[in-house]
């Protein structure tokens, strides 16, 4: 039987993993600069956590979750997003009691959604996210947005667009909800079954429907901006003011609602404007989620965060013709000639690695010519040749692969010599 990678997943081979490592390195560096600390949560959680926090009327919960019953007859779900688990951990571990607030966290790891595979969109995908929990200051909203943009800028992206909106507070949402019901109700039969079921439960989700997005009633629906109360309008104005202070350009889109139920006040997306990037231009999305901690029994802890796909980050880089520095080359390749040289060569390999020098040798018992070709393919900077004569003399032959220069060096001095020439 021939086995293949599951549909909607991918193998990331060694020729590509170094790019992921470079992206993650930049993410870690940016988060360190902004003082966000890494958190690692389980890959699966209780299903009810996502139902309560992500929202039962969302496509994520209704259609896309990988849910299973464990041996204890408990319903578990592979995490479809990161915020719910982070908030759960925040409450469970009483991070609200930390002396330094807000608590700033970030995560990087696989998420799972059963959806149609598209370019840069998989059923198992890797997501980087950041969360700031414990502050209702609009300045932290601007900081979180700045962090996300900073990651993209540091990987070289320039063709970006930030879109923001305000979803208002509970009072605004209730008034807007009633207006949406009145707007859609006379014609709800024209919409898909999902939208029909959402009319009374959560009509805001109709605006985010993928099936009926072309219906003119969505374009003419009441705008949430018209229902913002004074407090919400001022909050949004303050967020925009902080973005202006930071020199961050943005567009206001009154139709931006995001796909998860927990958002309120600030919502935002970062998009690629690069030609040929594809139909789905969103790289990153996020927003404020006041009330989420209380929903699972925690104290009041307003928060804001975002999530970005690493797959789509790499696609955006390719669309703009950007790339990371070349994969690190091999410092030393040891070529051994004859059985007598094998053990000394292997011993030298260990000494080089202990000194922090990237080293390798042949394990296929190949001839000298084949070993030299292998060193060339691996972009080795230096080749160390050891044969029976060199073993007898207690020396090794160093060959600089850039200019072909060769020099004999006593084995006792070899590691220090290579440290000086390769590491400085």
Image (cartoon, rainbow, N blue to C red):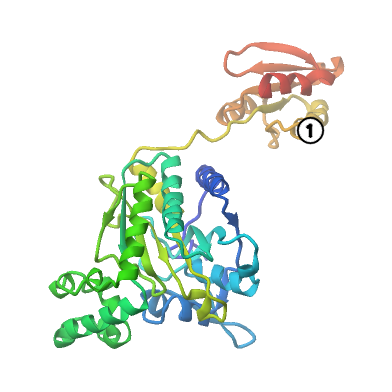
Mark 1 element type: helix
- Residue 291: x and y in percent read 47, 75
**Residue 117 visible in rendering:** no
The one nearer the camera, 110 or 203, is 203
Whole-percent x, y for residue 397 in the image = 73, 16
Residue depicted at x 19% and y 81%: 191
Image height check: is 323 above or below 302?
above
Residue 201 in the image, given as x and y percentages of width and height: 32, 86
Q: In the depicted view, which residue is nearer to us: 249 or 139?
A: 139
Identify the residue position indicated by label 1 in the image: 346
Horizontally, residue 159 falls left or right of residue 293, namely left
Image quarter hosting the C terminus: top right
Q: Is residue 369 above or below residue 209?
A: above
Looking at the picture, how far across and down is residue 277, in whole percent? 30, 49
Question: In terms of depth relative to the viewer, which is nearer, 68 or 147?
Answer: 147
- Binning the other alpha carbons within 10 Å of mark 1 as few (below 14), some (14 to 19) or many (20 upward) gives some
Residue in the picture at 56% in, 59% down? 105
Residue drawn at x 60%, y 30% is 374
Q: Is residue 343 left or right of residue 173?
A: right
Whether residue 240 sits left or right of residue 81 in the image: it is left
Residue 332 visible to the viewer: yes
């Amino acid at each position: 039987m021939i086995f293949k990678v599951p549909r909607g997943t991918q193998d990331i081979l060694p020729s590509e993993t170094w790019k992921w490592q470079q992206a993650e390195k930049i993410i870690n560096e940016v988060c360190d600069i902004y003082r966000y600390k890494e958190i690692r949560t389980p890959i699966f959680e209780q299903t009810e956590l996502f139902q309560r926090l992500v929202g039962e009327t969302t496509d994520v919960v209704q259609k896309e979750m990988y849910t299973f019953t464990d041996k204890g007859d408990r319903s578990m779900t592979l995490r479809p997003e990161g915020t719910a688990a982070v908030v759960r951990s925040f409450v469970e571990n009483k991070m609200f009691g930390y002396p330094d607030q807000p608590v700033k966290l970030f995560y990087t790891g696989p998420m799972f959604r059963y959806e149609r595979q598209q370019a840069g969109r998989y059923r198992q995908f890797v997501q980087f996210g950041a969360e700031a929990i414990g502050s209702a200051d609009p300045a932290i909203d601007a900081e979180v947005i700045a962090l996300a943009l900073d990651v993209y800028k540091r990987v070289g992206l320039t063709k970006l667009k930030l879109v923001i909106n305000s979803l208002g507070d509970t009072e605004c949402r209730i008034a807007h909800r009633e207006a949406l019901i009145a707007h859609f109700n006379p014609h709800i039969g024209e919409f898909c079954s999902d939208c029909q079921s959402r009319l009374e439960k959560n009509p805001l989700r109709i605006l985010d429907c993928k099936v009926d997005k072309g219906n003119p009633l969505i374009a003419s629906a009441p705008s949430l901006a018209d229902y913002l109360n004074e407090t919400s309008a001022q909050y949004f104005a303050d967020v925009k003011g902080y973005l202006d202070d930071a020199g961050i350009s943005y567009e206001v889109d009154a139709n931006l609602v995001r796909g998860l139920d927990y958002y309120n006040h600030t919502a935002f997306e970062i998009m690629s404007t690069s030609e040929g990037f594809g139909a789905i231009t969103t790289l990153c999305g996020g927003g404020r989620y006041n009330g989420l901690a209380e929903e699972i029994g925690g104290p009041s802890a307003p928060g804001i965060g975002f999530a970005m796909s690493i797959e789509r980050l790499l696609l955006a880089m390719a669309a703009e013709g950007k790339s990371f520095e070349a994969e690190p080359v091999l410092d030393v390749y040891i070529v051994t000639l004859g059985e007598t040289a094998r053990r000394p060569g292997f011993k030298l390999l260990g000494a080089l690695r202990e000194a922090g020098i990237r080293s390798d040798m042949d394990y296929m018992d190949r001839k000298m010519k084949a070993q030299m070709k292998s060193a060339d393919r691996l972009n080795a900077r230096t080749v160390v040749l050891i044969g029976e004569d060199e073993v007898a003399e207690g020396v090794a032959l160093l060959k600089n692969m850039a200019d072909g220069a060769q020099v004999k060096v006593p084995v006792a001095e070899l590691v220090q010599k290579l440290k000086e020439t390769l590491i400085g």
